[in-house]
Image: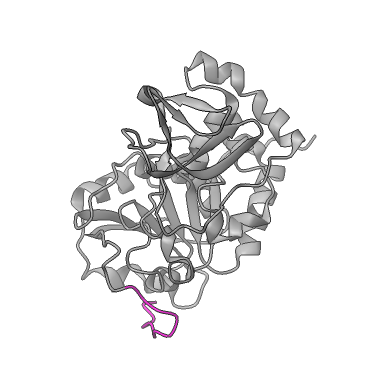
Amino acid sequence: MGERIPIPDWAVYLKVLGQRLAELPTCDFGAQSPRVVLSMPTGRFTYWMLTAGALSVQPQLDGDFVEGELVTTWLTEPFVITDLELKSERDTWQLTSQDKRVKSSFKAVRTPTDAPDSRRSTRMPQEIRDSFRSLEDESRMNQKGPWYATYTKQCLRPIVIIGRGREYIQEQRRVLLEAAPDWFSDDVRRFISRESVSVFEGDQMLFHPFMILDEKVGTSRPWIRPLTPRLTVVTSWNSHSALAASLFSRRPRVIVANRRVKGSAGVLSSLRHLRLDAKLQHLVDADRPSGIEAFAYTEPAQGASATDFDDGDAFEDAI
């Protein structure tokens, strides 16, 4: 057993910031949506500490459905997450021939109608299911429901990391889990421990607590644009500039500028023309340690009718 590594101030700050941003309400299309640029001495582990904080926030799911709506939810036997069309049977929704849910308490997320047909998660391996079952007693005590409900809620409002070098980002997660497991709470550690290559696939959105996607995913998988993950973390300003304009636009986004990367040191000074949000800046500056610079601004949340970038578009480097 290795020596315990105390969690440093910068990691505490990023966890708290991820939590604070994930707690912000989802804005309407056309309203101002929060954006935070962090200038960091290094990007190493930054994304995962923001993710850990955001995963600690209880997800808010949709309700008040009508018959025929397409939703994503879980099936209890076998446990999988899937898209399905709601069928009404008096005061319950008939999900399958053996799986019914009371309408008044049913929670899921509405799924865009242009999502690929027959989407379904792979079945969770037995050892992972056994690990999550240890959450069940705590979940019942907190009235959150059985373990699979707790896990699925995390998946239906995931944390999304977007950028280049996705395998490297995955490797950072593995290193942190092995070297500093105490930096994460027990439940968050479980949520980010599952290994799956499908976290790289845009069509697997809503099936995992976290996703690691490339910057062109909004163009290659346009159906995911209106989804509302709890938090999006983008690994560079260039990647942020390359995103489809409407991608996850109603939810908070953090853009990380790694000062070790050539040209990144001056990224904040290049953003002064943007709409500074004093209230958001105050939230971001609270307990911010030295060495981390931050700029908080807002931009309109663009809907599906917005002009999104295509693969052939040229992007002006902002850093």
Residue at the location (39% across, 54% down)?
112
Quick check: 51 above or below 319? above
Q: Does 73 sit left or right of 64 as displayed?
A: right
Dominant SS of magenta comes to loop
**Where does the N terminus fall, quadrant-wise?**
top right
The number of numbered badges drawn on the structure is 0
Residue 238 percent across, percent down from the top left: 43, 74
Q: Does 135 sit left or right of 12 as displayed?
A: right
Would residue 27 be counted in the magenta stretch?
Answer: no
Residue at the location (26% across, 69% down)?
306
Quick check: 192 above or below 319? above
Magenta range is: 308-319
Residue at the location (37% across, 55% down)?
253
**Where does the C terminus fall, quadrant-wise?**
bottom left
- Residue 79 is drawn in which quadrant? top right
Q: Residue furthest top?
A: 141
Residue 43 percent across, percent down from the top left: 53, 60
Residues 33 and 123: in front is 123
**Residue 159 shows in the view:** yes
**Residue 107 shows in the view:** no
Residue 87 percent across, percent down from the top left: 43, 36
Residue at the location (55% across, 69% down)?
164
- Residue 286 is drawn in which quadrant? top left
Residue 157 percent across, percent down from the top left: 45, 43
Residues 58 and 78: in front is 78
- Residue 181 is drawn in which quadrant? top right
Quick check: 71 above or below 78? below
Residues 235 and 6: in front is 235
